[in-house]
Image (cartoon, grey):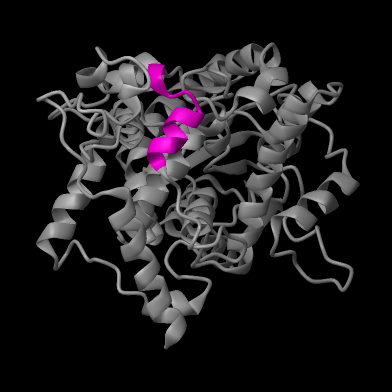
Amino acid sequence: MSDIQIVWLRRDLRMADNPALYHAAKAGPVIAVFVQDDDRASTHAYGGASRWWLHHSLESLGASFAKRHAKIVLRRGDSVEELLKIAKETGASTIHANRHYEPWWRNEEKALGEKIDLKRYDDANFLTVMGSIQTGTGGQYKIYTPFSRAVRAQFPPRDELPEPETLSSPDSFPAGDALEDWNLLPTRPDWAGGMRDFWKVGEAAAHERLDWWETHVDDYDDKRNLPSVDKTSRLSPHLHFGEISPVQIWHRFKHKRSDGWRTFESELIWRDYAQNTVAQFPLYARNNYREDFDQIEWRDPETDERAARDLKAWQQGRTGYPIVDAGMRQLWQTGWMHNRVRMITASFLIKHLLIDWRVGEQWFWDTLVDADYASNATNWQWTAGTGVDSNMFVRIMAPLSQSEKFDAARYIREYVPELRGLDEPYIHDPEEFGRLPKAYPPKIIGHKQARERALAAYKAIKSD
């Protein structure tokens, strides 16, 4: 009888194209383990929306294992300690894991590898092996455009791996928790009704969405910025939790030559770029890359009552800017937001309300089902102008003109019911046109006033 092989699952909740599972299954009987370890992640333990998704994803993958007469052992606590306990209980001497790059998981992998044979697989959740895309001098890229060119120069990515041909199990499994006992689902109150209506979760659902996307990806370049049109893949949470891999997506579409596919391919490469960024700067979600922004005088909701009211209005979608409010309500209702609107709402918090981007990063972390440490931090620092590769702070989005430019009327009507009776162009700025319904708030700050305040704050740090 071969030795038992432990597979440490994290953001790789799938059977197919799972290197750790594939190679473990070839080596012997498999015990798959998922450890709920909030303490090591600290401020970036799973947020509320992610916990909802995690419950259903583990439930779905558990059913797939059960069909193979296997199971996922669930434990709570310190990942290193729990994995070593299971190894001792079962006599296993090897743990297989797909490499992860979030700082807490890098620390865990290092600590675990010092105590047991840990076989790590580098390219499970990305198109490239992290660190392999190097500049001509052997360094790491910091700017996206040359990084993306270098990635394309190395294509194709590795081949897909099939599901394990056989998945043998030990005679008995170690004890584990019941998924229901983790209380990942909201109950008092149950705020997840909109997410249940909006999403299907799990590996099969990811491939169902991929099938749909294959017939629509060619339109992506033309229509991806139109929130009223359903021309985005919505694969992001499936990718985040590893229910599907970017390698699987790339190979599905590699025959395509459309602008839509090439633009979407760029989005997949952006995921690698973001991960490459946090691999270089592990605290990217907490620290400005551009240190001069440490001196900016943000309005602090912890100490400024007006700033606290403004933050709450932004969170609840009550700012008086219809495109911003539609996005924030979509986020609360579905756990997701259209990408163009993510940029608009993030810019509004940072530059219209002059509130630190990290406050927004934490709100998105808690409310997005696709909350990803690398992508979330990289996108917020890009918008704030504080990042290694970022938009200039002085480029301030005008949400009202963005709304009209990208034809957001139907999107606004869907998520801001107070405005459903308004035609265009009034719906984009009802206050300006004298069409403000009684149930809808006026703007919490005017665009010109907000712009001048933001530029003054920026000028102050540049003049010091």
Image: magenta residue range: 399-410
Does 113 appear above or below 23? below
Expressed as whole percent of the image width and height from the top left, the position of residue 247 reads: 74, 34
Point 57% across, 68% down: residue: 281
- In the picture, measured across the screen, residue 352 lies left or right of residue 5, that is left
Point 34% across, 62% down: residue: 452
Expressed as whole percent of the image width and height from the top left, the position of residue 87 reads: 53, 50
Does residue 297 appear in this view? yes
- Farthest front residue? 433
Q: Nearer the viewer, residue 311 or 212?
A: 311
Is residue 354 inside the magenta stretch?
no
- Farthest bottom residue? 464
Does residue 46 appear in this view? no
Q: Nearer the viewer, residue 167 or 386?
A: 386
Point 34% across, 30% down: residue: 179
Is residue 409 inside the magenta stretch?
yes
Q: Dominant secondary structure of the magenta stretch?
A: helix
Q: Quadrant of residue 131?
A: bottom right
